[in-house]
């Protein structure tokens, strides 16, 4: 069964500094990868997704992620964070041919002033 | 469009009681799913449906039942609530069940406490 590992439960970062949130998935022939964000007391919304093609995916709010098949990783990056990026970020994966979307445990991003 | 609507927003149950969490979407989405969110556990898939009349189990289906009689509605039933079912429940839907998955649209959640 597919699984997702988010290596950091919390990441503190100073405002305007870069950030990387790490995500690894269990190996599969073909996968689809997603990052979702959950702002306080809200549901989740899609940041970006990788389906095929270019391994660098750009999403909303200045976020991007890079698919690395050899390392089975899909890390999320932003070059300069803002206080409004304070949220919990979830990596998710779906195997090709499978209707289940499996989420990681989430990473809380704390922006320090 | 209302999107994905979940009711109620909050619910307190006693152990052994039954209840149904409602989920409705007005986007004509084929795919609907239920997740529970617990601290430190992320979101775990309970059940999902790829269309009316079709449901399947997710990662943590025990203690929950679902049915999908219409495209719009996907209720989640707890037949005999247990304290371990205290959680925040999210319903999510997407347009297509054909791979690749389209993005999921999430409801605002139901916070359930079982005493």
Image: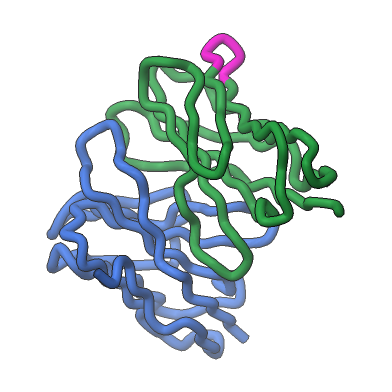
Chain colours: A green, B blue
Q: Is residue A90 left or right of residue B97?
A: right
Relative image position of residue A40 (x, y in whole percent): 63, 66
Identify which residue, A55 or A99, lies in the foreground: A55
Is the residue A112 above or below the residue A27 in the image?
A: below
Relative image position of residue B1 (x, y in whole percent): 24, 69
Identify which residue, B78 or A40, lies in the foreground: A40
Q: Is residue A46 visible?
A: yes
Q: How many marks?
A: 0
Magenta stretch holds residue B84? no
Q: Residue at x 55, y 44 (%)?
A: A61
Is the residue B11 above or below the residue A95 in the image?
A: below
Relative image position of residue A3 (x, y in whole percent): 53, 34
Q: Residue furthest top?
A: A70
Q: Residue at x 36, y 56 (%)?
A: B105
Is the residue B86 above or below the residue A110 in the image?
A: below
Q: Residue at x 48, y 68 (%)?
A: B89
Q: Is residue A1 visible?
A: no
Which quadrant would the C terminus of chain B be assigned to in this image?
bottom right
Relative image position of residue A49 (x, y in whole percent): 43, 34
- For residue B66, what is the image quadrant? bottom left
Q: Main secondary structure of the magenta part?
A: loop
Identify which residue, B90 or A55, lies in the foreground: A55
Q: Which residues are magenta?
A: A68-72
- For residue B6, what is the image quadrant? bottom left
Q: Is residue B70 left or right of residue A68?
A: left
């Amino acid at each position: 069964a597919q699984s997702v590992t988010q290596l950091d439960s919390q990441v503190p970062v100073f405002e305007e500094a870069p950030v990387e949130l790490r995500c690894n998935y269990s190996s599969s022939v073909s996968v689809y990868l997603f990052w979702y964000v959950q702002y306080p007391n809200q549901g989740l919304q899609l940041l970006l997704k990788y389906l095929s093609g270019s391994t660098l995916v750009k999403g909303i709010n200045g976020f991007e992620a890079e698919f690395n098949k050899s390392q089975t990783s899909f890390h999320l990056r932003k070059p300069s964070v803002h206080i409004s990026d304070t949220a919990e970020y979830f990596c998710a994966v779906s195997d090709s041919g499978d209707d289940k979307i499996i989420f990681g445990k989430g990473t809380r991003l704390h922006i320090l002033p | 469009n209302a999107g994905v609507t979940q009711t109620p927003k909050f619910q307190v149950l006693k152990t052994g009681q039954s209840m149904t969490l409602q989920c409705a979407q007005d986007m004509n989405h084929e795919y609907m799913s239920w997740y529970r969110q617990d601290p430190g556990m992320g979101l775990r898939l309970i059940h999902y449906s790829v269309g009316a009349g079709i449901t399947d189990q997710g990662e943590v289906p025990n203690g929950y039942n679902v049915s999908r009689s219409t495209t719009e509605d996907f209720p989640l039933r707890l037949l005999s609530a247990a304290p371990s079912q205290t959680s925040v429940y999210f319903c999510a839907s997407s347009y297509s069940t054909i791979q690749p998955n389209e993005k999921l649209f999430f409801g605002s959640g139901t916070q359930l406490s079982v005493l």
